[in-house]
Amino acid sequence: MKYLFILLITAYVALAGQTPMGDSEGNTPPPDRNIDDIREILDGVKASVQEAYEGLLITEPEASGDIFVRFAITPDGAVTDLEVTCTDGLETLVDPVTETMTSLDFGSCPGQAENLPVSIPISLLPPQQES
């Protein structure tokens, strides 16, 4: 029996309204947050979600659905305004995902003037059995 675990994570980051302002001498602060840096940090979330989902599959082998994670990254790199929701059957994954997300640190970004909203849809599919 061969198992296939599929986890799809796509991060949507709202970068609108982030314009670095120069000082009176024409110096500008470092650039805003880089989407690739954000994705790299969010890759750590994949392992946590995968571990929790595989645990759920032991008791609920057909469990599947979506988890939606919405939060904001503060200029100092903390996670705020966290909201984790899911489709029916995945409720036991909300706490592990919430725990992982609250422990993230995106690092300070002086060029970021406001909180940066981020949305992550996560689709989970059960393993497929080989015929």
Image (cartoon, rainbow, N blue to C red):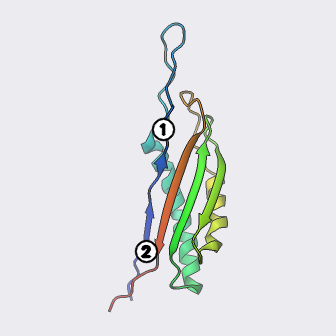
- Contact between marks 2 and 1 (CB within 8 A): the answer is no
84 in relation to 6, above or below = above
The residue singled out by tag 2 in the image is 5
Query: Depth check: 6 or 88 in front?
Result: 88
Report the disc number at residue 1: none
The kind of secondary structure element at disc 2 is: loop
Residue corresponding to mark 1: 15
**Can you tell which quarter of the image residue 73 is in?**
top right
Of all residues, the one furthest to the top in this rendering is 25
Nearer to us of marks 2 and 1 is 1
- Where residue 92 sits: x, y (%)? 65, 73
Determine the residue located farthest toward the bottom in the rendered image. 131
The residue drawn where x is 51% and y is 7% is: 25
**Labels 2 and 1: the sequence-earlier one:** 2
Image position of 91 (left or right of 118): right
Quadrant where the C terminus is found in the figure:
bottom left
Residue at x-position 59% and y-position 34% = 108
**How would you rate the neighbour count of disc 2 (Cα within 10 Å): few for under 14, some for 14-19, many for 20 or more?**
few
The image quadrant where one finds the N terminus is: bottom left
User: Could you tell whether 127 is left or right of 91 in the image?
Assistant: left
Q: What element carries label 1?
A: loop
Local crowd at mark 1 within 10 Å, few (<14), some, or many (≥20)? some
- Indicate the amino acid at tag 1: Leu
Tell me the kind of residue under disc 2: Phe
* Residue drawn at the location 57% of the way across and 85% of the way down: 60
Distance CA(mark 2)–CA(mark 1) = 32 Å
Q: Which residue is drawn at 48% across and 71% down?
A: 124
Residue 13 lies, in percent from the top left, at 49, 45
Question: What percent of the width, then of the height, locates residue 120?
Answer: 51, 56
Residue 54 lies, with reference to residue 7, above or below; the image says: below
